[in-house]
Image: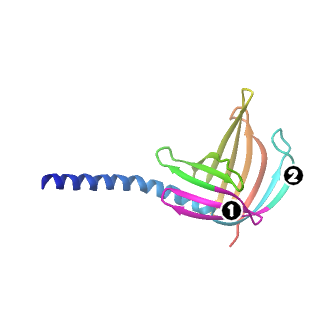
Amino acid sequence: MNRIYAIAVCACLALAIAMAGAAPVAAGLDKIAVYAGTWKITTQHFATPYSKAGRENATLRNDCWRSAGFYACDQFVNGASRALIVFIYDAKHDLYHSYAIPAGSGRVFAGTLIIKGNRWTYPNEYTNHGKTVYFRTVNMFSKPDSIEYRQEFSTDKVRWTVMAKGTEHKLP
């Protein structure tokens, strides 16, 4: 009888520990839900070694859903499905991992998302012939339905050059 009781107590403790670990993950993933819906995007691109000057307008629709430890969005640009993006939350390091799977391609692009208040940063880097260039997209949420963003590059992570900037406004 004592053995059954000990097993039951251990099982309850294991379940409690698992549930306690799930709470931060759930809260973390809930932040991503702000992306769901349809957004009007306006972008101004600048001439840099990594971008060409120009203007762009688009409609972005994120069909999103949550399933346990994942948050996924099928992204439609101007009506066409372009990518499936899957987010997971790392509560220990307070950051997100994202995996973008372009429509019609088997290649997966892995990335990181760092959320600090209303500033959401997607850092990346590229190394070619021993030279590393750092890239980042910074989204600043002024409201849950309004984003100002910029795409930048740097060779030293100190001085950043803007490649593009724009706005996203969520449609009702």
User: Looking at the picture, which amino acid does disc 2 mark?
Assistant: Gly
Residue position for label 2: 54
Residue 15, horizontal then vertical, whole percent: 32, 55
Numbered tag placed on residue 75 in the rendering: none
Q: Could you tell me which quadrant the N terminus lies in?
A: bottom left
Dot 1 corresponds to which residue? 146
Left or right side of 153 for 93: left
Residue that appears at 80% across and 55% down: 43
Q: Position of residue 8 (x, y in %)?
A: 22, 56
Q: Does the magenta stretch mainly form a helix, a strand or a loop?
A: strand
Q: CA distance from mark 2 to mark 1?
A: 22 Å
Q: What residue do we see at 53% from left, 56% from top?
A: 70
Q: Is residue 65 left or right of residue 62?
A: left
Q: Give the percent coordinates (x, y) of residue 53.
A: 87, 48
Instruction: Give the extent of the magenta segment.
Output: 58-84
Disc 1 on helix, strand or loop?
A: strand
The one of 150 and 22 positioned closer to us in this rendering:
22
Asked if the stretch drawn in magenta spans residue 65, the answer is: yes
Q: Which element carries disc 2, helix, strand or loop?
A: strand
Label 2 Cα neighbours within 10 Å, binned few <14 / some 14-19 / many ≥20: few
Q: Is residue 4 above or below residue 169?
A: above
**Residue at the left extreme?**
1
Q: Circle 1: is it few (<14), some (14-19), or many (20+) Cα within 10 Å?
A: some
The spot of residue 80 in percent (x, y) is 75, 64
Residue 10 drawn above or below residue 161: below
- Residue name at image x 79 percent, y 45 percent: 163
Quadrant of image for the C terminus: bottom right
Q: Which mark lies nearer to you, 2 or 1? A: 2
Residue name at image x 22 percent, y 53 percent: 7
The stretch drawn in magenta includes residue 11 = no
Q: Amino acid at mark 1?
A: Ser
